Image (cartoon, rainbow, N blue to C red):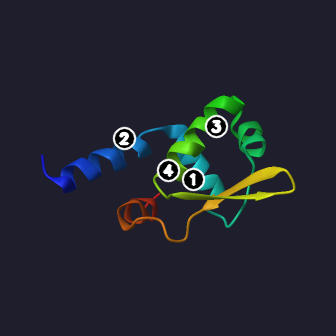
Amino acid sequence: MSVNIKRWTIVFRVLSSPNRLKIIKMLSGKRKMTVGDISVNLKVSFNAVSNNLAILKNLDILEAEGRDGHVFYSINSKMPNDFRKILNHI
């Protein structure tokens, strides 16, 4: 399997989660939110949101900033182009 196909498999697997797409959409308005904020808005458990945020952060879709004892997540302006191309259509 070529590297390109492996990469696209990862891209589509990550974006196949409705909750991950909702998180991306929620943060795409230049907002910075904590795990708790996102959990309340999505009505999803703190742990589920935390796991999804970790996946998105590990793939450089999101960035995290610690401040005042909280971690604030936002869209990474330097996210990989393959994700950016797809997310521009959502």
User: Reading the chain from its start, which is encountered first: label 1 or label 3?
Assistant: 1
Provide the secondary structure element on which disc 3 rests: helix
Q: Secondary structure at mark 2?
A: helix
Mark carried by residue 13? 2
Disc 2: CA contacts within 10 A as few (<14), some (14-19) or many (>=20)? few
Q: CA distance from mark 4 to mark 3?
A: 14 Å
Question: Label 3 near label 2: C-beta < 8 Å?
Answer: no
The residue depicted at 47 percent of the width and 65 percent of the height is 79
Residue located at (72% from left, 37% from top): 39
User: What amino acid type is highlighted by mark number 3?
Assistant: Val
Q: Is residue 16 left or right of 34 when viewed as pictured?
A: left
Looking at the image, is mark 1 or mark 4 earlier in the sequence? 1
Which residue is label 3 attached to?
A: 49
- Alpha carbons under labels 1 and 4: distance apart: 14 Å
Callouts 1 and 2 close, C-beta under 8 Å: no
Which badge, 2 or 3, comes first in the chain's sequence? 2
> Which circle marks residue 78 in the picture?
none
**Which three-letter amino acid code belongs to the residue tagged 2?**
Arg
Callout 4: 10 Å neighbours few (<14), some, many (20+)? few
Which circle's residue, 4 or 3, is located before the other in the chain? Answer: 3
